[in-house]
Image: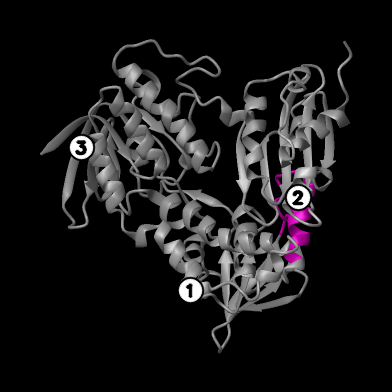
Amino acid sequence: MTTTYDLIVIGAGPVGENVADYATKRGLRTVIVESELVGGECSYWACMPSKALLRSVHARSAALRVDGAKQAVTGDLDVAAVLRRRDSFVSDYDDGGQVGWLESAGIDLVRGHARLSGVRKVSVTTPENEIVELEATYAVAVSTGSAALLPDIDGLADAQPWTSREATGVTDIPDSIAIIGGGVVAAEMATAFAGLGSTVTVIARGGLLASMEPFAGQLVADALTEAGATLHLGRSPVSVRRDDAGDAVITLDDGTVVTAAEVLLATGRTPRTEDLGLSTVGLDDGDWLGVDDTLLVDAPTNADEKWLYAVGDVNHRALLTHQGKYQARAAGEVIAARAQDRTVDDAPWGLHVATADAEAVPQVTFTDPEVASVGLTEKAATDAGYPVRSVDYEIGSVSGAALQADGYKGTARLVIDTERDIVLGATFVGQDVADLVHSATIAVVGQVPVRRLWHAVPSYPTISEVWLRLLETYGRPES
């Protein structure tokens, strides 16, 4: 027996929830299918638990940087209390609250593993091993996300490495941990475990935060070293094994041997499409799902019918929760518009497109110091052919930053298109800079002329004054 809906959404993380919510608000009858917890990776194993762990580390470090406050910090973090706070943010891994939200939003839920079984058809294997057949009148949206990538390293799989899931869900802090990778997850987890008392080693083939401005990775590397971590940058592991004591023994390509109680993999992501039934609609199982700006999948069966969408990590455009939710809003709206024969607004920056995915993606890396960035780096802008000039400013020279922390260390950069007089990218590295990025995002998305930014007066004394100092460094436009 087949149940029919206007829209079937596969994956009930924040992305899938938003696709379903926006389509439902436009009048479509929607069902969402989830094989794990409603709320997804971000809610239980990524964004929320990792930031909950990091917040305690950040708060203690910030207090130690303010004379008068640092004298009150007389001990280490209470690890048990930190973990209890983490558990509160993941609702003790109970998704009852999220299920209640689906009900209140008028979205049906089917629990189980979903597979495409044909055009607009989905077959769900429930936890009771029963089969539920679903069919969509208009569309199916895949929002299954991504999983940790297991690199091809001799002995690694047998060594039972952690992924980000085990790291954010940790119940006992290991005495030592080796982290393989140099991206955001690696840098954040190195910060967290160093703050929670582990001896941390980072092994990064391409350096730390290599896709960002070079000074970002350098400042974070310096801070990790100061916190007691050992960094092997430009090095790769060639083998991993467990010794008789159960410790992970990692041999690097220069012959160095690293021993740690646990090893954490943070080397990239792979799409969760390996058992999705893609072959039934002319696609390859296990592949990323390429899409256009309306999130429509590039598939043979989609040319005329426009029924299959891929939203969030699974389309490999921007692997960030907030960017996936942005895509989801566009996808939910455009699915409803096409279903109801309304005009599709697919011009750049239109209601039904995810234009910002290209060159206006914001991101905060919650290391200590934080890294907040949006848009293009200097290198990316130059490689794209833009005429650019970059200006830097030491954030510690701003009065608001000096008040925030004694001996404040941090750097800000604007990347400016000199021909169009607009900001292409911005990066802020320092304590408490996360909330600076949205002002930069507005400048980038709005293509606000630099001469107009002179009239956006930063409040004194706040770290936002760095905007004025960057503009002064760039130079006042001639009248």
* Magenta region, residue range: 205-225
Residue that label 3 marks? 134
Question: Which amino acid is tagged 2?
Answer: Leu
Question: Which amino acid is tagged 1?
Answer: Ala
Q: CA distance from mark 2 to mark 3?
A: 59 Å
Residue that label 2 marks? 403
Residue that label 1 marks? 80
Looking at the rendered image, the quarter that the N terminus falls into is top left
206 drawn magenta: yes
Position of residue 447 measured from the top left corner of the image (x, y, whole percent): 67, 20
Q: From the viewer's side, name the closer residue of 122 and 433.
A: 433
Numbered disc 1: secondary structure: helix
Mark nearer the viewer, 2 or 3 = 2
Residue 398 vertical position relative to residue 91 in the rendered view, above or below: above
Q: CA distance from mark 1 to mark 3?
A: 45 Å
> Residue 476's image quarter?
top right
The residue shown at (72%, 64%) is 68
Question: Which amino acid is tagged 3?
Answer: Leu
Mark nearer the viewer, 1 or 2 = 2
The residue shown at (27%, 41%) is 102
> Residue 282's image quarter?
top left
Q: CA distance from mark 1 to mark 2?
A: 32 Å
Direction from residue 193 to residue 321 in the image, left or right: left
Position of residue 158 measured from the top left corner of the image (x, y, whole percent): 50, 74
Q: Which residue is outermost to the bottom?
A: 244
Position of residue 197 measured from the top left corner of the image (x, y, whole percent): 62, 74
Task: Tell whether label 3 touches label 2 (CB within 8 Å).
Answer: no
Residue 312 vertical position relative to residue 257 in the rendered view, above or below: above
Give the class, few, some or many, for how many residues have Cα within 10 Å of label 2's Cα (few <14, many ≥20): some
Numbered disc 2: secondary structure: helix
